[in-house]
Amino acid sequence: MTDLCSMYQKKLPVELECGLHLFMEVMNGKWKLNLIWCIYSGIKRPGELQRRIPKASRRLLDTQLKQLTDQGIITKTIFDQRPAKVEYALTPLGESLIPVIEVTARWGEVHRNILEPLFQSPVL
C-alpha cells in the first residue's frame, strides 16, 4: 500500500526566504504543538499521546508525528519486542522550540480575558 503522505504534492511551493515561513511550515498542523509539548512533558508512547489528545484521530496524530520525525523535530524509536513498543523523543532542534511554545502560551494567558470571549459559542 502506498503511503498517502508521499503521494501528496503541495499546490504551492514552500516559502523559504523568511524564517517565519519556515517556522509556520514546521508547525502547520492542528496538533503539532500539542504533540511537541506532550513529548517534552514526558509522554512518549503513541497510546499515551492519543489519550492526552482525545479530540485528534489516531491517523491524524500518526501523520503529524511522521511529519515531525521527517522534519527532525522528534525521533521515533522502535523497540524489538512483542508486543511492539514505540517511543518518541525531542531532538535538539525540537528542544529549541520549547521556549517559543512557552512564550506563546504565556501570551495566550496574558490576553485570555480579551481572546476567550471571541471563541466561545453564543448561548441561544
Image: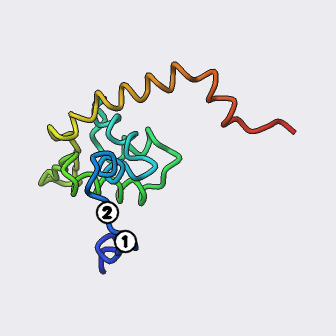
Q: Residue at x 41, y 29 (%)?
A: 104
Quadrant where the C terminus sits is top right
Circles 1 and 2 in contact, beta carbons < 8 Å: yes
The CA span between labels 1 and 2 is 8 Å
Q: Position of residue 98 (x, y in %)?
A: 28, 31
The residue sitting at the left extreme is 80
Secondary structure under the numbered disc 1 in the rendered image = loop
The correct choice, above or below, for 1 with respect to 54 in the image is below
The residue sitting at the bottom extreme is 1
The residue sitting at the right extreme is 124
Q: Is residue 87 left or right of residue 57?
A: left
Determine which residue is flagged by label 1: 10
Q: Position of residue 117 (x, y in %)?
A: 69, 29
Tag of residue 14: 2
Relative depth, front residue between 73 and 113: 113
Q: Residue at x 44, y 38 (%)?
A: 52
Relative depth, front residue between 48 and 110: 110
Secondary structure under the numbered disc 2 in the rendered image = loop
Amino acid carrying mark 2 in the image: Val
Neighbour tally class for label 2: few under 14, some 14-19, many 20 plus, Cα within 10 Å:
few
Q: Is residue 112 left or right of residue 120?
A: left
